[in-house]
Image: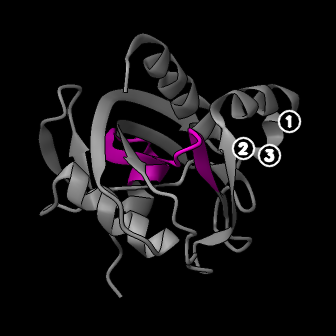
Amino acid sequence: MKEEQVILVNEKDEPIGLMNKLEAHEKAVLHRAFSVFILNDKNEVMLQQRAHHKYHSPLLWTNTCCSHQRASETNIEAGKRRLFEEMGFKAELKELFHFIYKAPFDNGLTEHELDHVMIGYSNEEPNINCEEVESWKWMTIEDIKDDMVANPDIYTVWFKIIFDEFYHYLEDHKL
């Protein structure tokens, strides 16, 4: 099976090439990514716990789903595809903002991403893909914020960064 490629971008989100995903993470090259937050009608966020056999960040909690766009996809198409692949349901998504972050892992890999943050709404119970996801739960935004302070080691490195940006976005914008 051919390794998935990521879209290399400059700081203006202009594509400058493709690279194998693992190589991009080994070399910490800036590439396009996305993060999806699904909220329910109680304004709770659906979190996923990464599968126990993932090559980085196993069993850590993170946002509903995140991944990388393929060369032929829009941000929204990629978000919908991955939401269905990981969580087993569909939802309309809206892009909120994007930003660049860099986060090293313990295993020598580094996320250096221009991340497109999207939001969607659903009350549906997911049908999780056990290859990707160990478990899931709903949490309020304030409870996530408090729990990240109390238990920072149970969350992915990137989720702590992305959640902070998401939280500040919600403070400044009415959804």
Q: Secondary structure at mark 2?
A: loop
Residue 105 or residue 75, whichever sits in front: 75
Residue 130: quadrant of the picture: bottom right
Q: Position of residue 100 (x, y in %)?
A: 38, 28
**Label 3 is placed on what type of residue?**
Ile
User: Which label is found at residue 122?
Assistant: none
- Mark 2 neighbour density, 10 Å: few (under 14) some (14–19) many (20 or more): many
Q: Is residue 101 above or below residue 112?
A: above
Q: Residue furthest right?
A: 150
- Magenta span: 24-47
- Mark 1 neighbour density, 10 Å: few (under 14) some (14–19) many (20 or more): few
- Residue denoted by label 2: 155
For the point 31% across and 62% down, the residue is 80
- Residue denoted by label 1: 151
Left or right of 88: which side holds 53? right
- Mark 3 neighbour density, 10 Å: few (under 14) some (14–19) many (20 or more): some
Q: Position of residue 82 (x, y in %)?
A: 38, 65
- Residue denoted by label 3: 154
